[in-house]
């Protein structure tokens, strides 16, 4: 009985925790992005283009030290932008655990020259396996850190508007913006659904009941999403929406932004050249 | 299933962005035609739903838990085109703002889950459900199997993308630069988890949500039921497919680029390659430095003589220009596929008509 009890609490509470963590993350990212810091003062278009170029340079590089150097620069930028290590560390840890678990077998399975023999089990680690695992882990950590730097130093509305420089159609930019707003609303709705269920729960909940609870939650959410989309549409029409979508472009480049763009471009080009 | 940055080469990512682009274009046109001014709010809310459903951790029989992607639910409720847009938007937001999936891999993730997954799930759902009543158990079973098939085929696509990396991208010392596992490891490793856990989660969510909607709001299942007018029927199929035809034509014109690639693709060697030192080196380089046998394998030698292709190596013997020969082969191949497809379509339609006439008389 106690096992079921723990399982029941585990499922409902863990779902609430996951939903709450997602909401908290967005709120915290917005707070940091609107604060003071090195990158916060730079035009979002420059940051988006520059940091994407770094991610691409890391992906293109076939030299480990180049990828590691990009990681070091990204971490420095995060610290100068007042993004605390406590924000970066969980992402590093989860990426390390996930990718590390995937990379470990490659140490033994990748054919090549022997780096280390494990006599008791008869396995051998190859130089190529070590290099391959290192490539995978450093690339994942570097790209993840750069993406994090972007999100924690730029308000999400600005990131979405900046996507216009990548020629993303304006309607997609608008839909992405609205989606992000309604994700928060649906996350909150889902969290409240599970919270209210938790407050009414007495006794044990079997695995079957837990499944039913999650599935009914999904069904209610999709019905609410449809209903809400109708209401939002009527509200948009009431405000004069006739199908045309526009994005206000309030960004303007300063000398500092041009300098930042040059630095981003030089570093990306240098990394791509050195890592070739 | 959400491929992070660093697992796929930039070239693979670019190819998959390119592969996804025509589907996004057609989907946007079709959904826009069907929804008009309702497009923005409807798509936003549905993408938000797809995002949230991916966060539900479902308890499964046997004590384990699994996340559903919502491919089955989205395809059954929205139809394939709206589903591929909604899931793509949810995946983009996950990658950009939540670090779930890589930014360079957005195209790959959308191609696998949003496009392939939605099309497979919708096709399986319609094939099994056929014209069953909206509240029938058959539709629940169809939705479950559709979700299961959709997520597993999407996982297979991801596994193939992983598996081709070590054959294509290595550093000077032979270390794989991206995902290190070849196809014979990547496919089973990926599929075991999806066939046994993630697929089951998707099956339960798809079947469960459809069963729930049958009770609470069956109208939501009507648009894709095949019984009433749906989103896909709202626009002219020929007009909506025009960009795909244009894409196909462009790809055909670009086929001579294939001449630029040196050597043979892995596993496509001919008998004469075994005696050719340069070809042997290429085979070894792409096979983890294992040299092929010195003699041509007997079975390969015997079977390769059974059939001589009229356009061997995509080079018709009577065409002097290699580029033109490539182009001609592309046109011929596409023409054959089209004739086959139209023939099969005509056959199916005539059978359907015959059945309807028999039922009417």
Image (cartoon, helix red, strand yellow):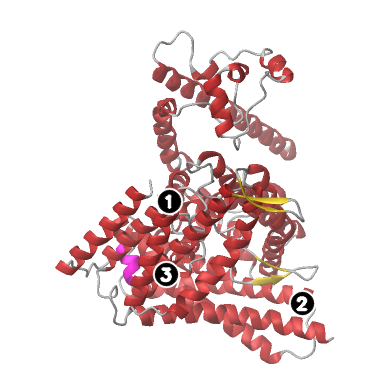
Q: Which residue is mark 2?
A: A209
In the image, is A151 to the left or to the right of B100?
A: left
C-alpha span from label 3 to label 1: 23 Å
Name above or below for residue A269 compared with residue A101. above
| Percent x, y of residue A54 | 36, 58
C-alpha span from label 1 to label 2: 52 Å
Farthest residue to the top: give it. B318
**Range covered by the magenta-colored residues:** A155-162
Reply yes or no: does residue B279 show up in magenta: no
Name above or below for residue A228 compared with residue B296. below
Q: Which residue is mark 3?
A: A148
| Percent x, y of residue A80 | 32, 76
Please give the name of the residue rendered at 52% of the width and 59% of the height, measured from the top-left corner: A137
Is disc 2 on the same chain as disc 1? yes
Count residues near mark 3 (Cα–Cα under 10 Å), then give few for <14, some for 14-19, many for 20+.
many
| Percent x, y of residue A116 | 64, 53
Please give the name of the residue rendered at 63% of the width and 78% of the height, measured from the top-left corner: A15
Q: Which residue is mark 1?
A: A63
C-alpha span from label 2 to label 3: 38 Å
């Amino acid at each position: 009985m106690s096992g079921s009890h723990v399982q029941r609490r585990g499922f409902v509470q863990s779902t609430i925790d996951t939903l709450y963590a997602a909401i908290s993350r967005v709120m915290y990212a917005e707070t940091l992005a609107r604060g003071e810091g090195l990158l916060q003062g730079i035009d979002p278009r420059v940051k988006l283009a520059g940091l994407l170029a770094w991610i691409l340079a890391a992906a293109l590089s076939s030299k480990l030290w180049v990828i590691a150097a990009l990681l070091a620069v990204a971490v420095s930028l995060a610290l100068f932008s007042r993004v605390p290590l406590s924000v970066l560390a969980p992402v590093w840890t989860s990426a390390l655990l996930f990718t590390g678990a995937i990379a470990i077998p490659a140490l033994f399975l990748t054919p090549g020259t022997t780096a280390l023999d494990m006599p008791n089990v008869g396995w051998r680690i190859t130089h190529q396996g070590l290099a391959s695992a290192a490539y995978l882990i450093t690339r994942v950590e570097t790209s993840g850190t750069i993406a994090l730097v972007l999100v924690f130093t730029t308000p999400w509305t600005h990131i979405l508007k900046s996507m216009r420089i990548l020629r993303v159609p304006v309607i997609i930019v608008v839909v992405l913006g609205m989606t992000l707003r309604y994700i928060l609303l649906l996350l909150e709705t889902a969290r409240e659904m599970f919270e209210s269920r938790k407050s009414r729960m007495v006794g044990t909940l079997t695995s079957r009941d837990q499944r039913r609870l999650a599935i009914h939650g999904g069904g209610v959410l999709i019905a609410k999403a449809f209903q809400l989309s109708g209401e939002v549409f009527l509200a948009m029409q009431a405000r004069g929406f006739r199908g045309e979508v526009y994005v206000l472009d309030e960004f303007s480049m300063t000398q500092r932004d041009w300098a930042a763009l040059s630095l981003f471009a030089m570093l990306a080009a240098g990394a791509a050249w050195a890592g070739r | 299933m959400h491929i992070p940055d660093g697992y796929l080469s930039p070239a693979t990512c670019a190819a998959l962005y390119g592969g996804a682009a025509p589907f996004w274009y057609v989907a946007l046109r079709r959904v826009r035609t069907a929804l008009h001014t309702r497009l923005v709010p409807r798509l936003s809310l549905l993408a938000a739903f797809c995002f949230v459903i991916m966060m539900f951790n479902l308890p499964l029989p046997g004590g384990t838990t699994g996340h559903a992607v919502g491919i089955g639910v989205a395809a059954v409720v929205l139809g394939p085109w709206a589903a591929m847009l909604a899931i793509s938007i949810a995946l983009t937001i996950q990658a950009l703002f939540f670090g779930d999936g890589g930014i360079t891999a957005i195209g790959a993730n959308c191609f696998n889950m949003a496009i392939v997954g939605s099309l497979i799930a919708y096709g399986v759902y319609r094939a099994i459900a056929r014209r069953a009543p909206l509240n029938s158990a058959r539709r629940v079973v169809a939705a479950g199997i559709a979700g299961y098939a959709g997520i597993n085929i999407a996982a297979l696509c991801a596994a193939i993308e992983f598996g081709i990396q070590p054959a294509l991208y290595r550093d000077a010392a032979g270390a794989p630069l991206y995902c290190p596992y070849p196809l014979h490891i990547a496919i089973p490793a990926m599929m075991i988890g999806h066939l046994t856990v993630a697929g089951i989660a998707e099956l339960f969510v798809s079947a469960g949500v459809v069963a729930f909607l049958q009770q609470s709001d069956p109208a939501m299942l009507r648009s894709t039921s095949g019984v009433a007018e749906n989103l896909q029927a709202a626009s002219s199929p020929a007009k909506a497919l025009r960009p795909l035809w244009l894409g196909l034509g462009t790809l055909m014109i670009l086929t001579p680029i294939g001449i630029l690639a040196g050597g043979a693709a892995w596993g496509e060697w001919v008998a004469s390659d075994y005696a050719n030192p340069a070809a042997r080196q290429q085979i070894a380089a792409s096979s983890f430095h294992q040299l092929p046998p010195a003699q041509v394998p007997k079975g390969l030698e015997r079977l390769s003589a059974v059939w001589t292709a009229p356009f061997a190596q995509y080079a018709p013997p009577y065409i002097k220009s290699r580029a033109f020969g490539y182009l001609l082969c592309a046109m011929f191949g596409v023409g054959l596929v089209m004739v086959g497809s139209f023939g099969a379509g005509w056959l199916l339609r005539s059978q359907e008509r015959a059945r309807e006439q028999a039922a009417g008389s």
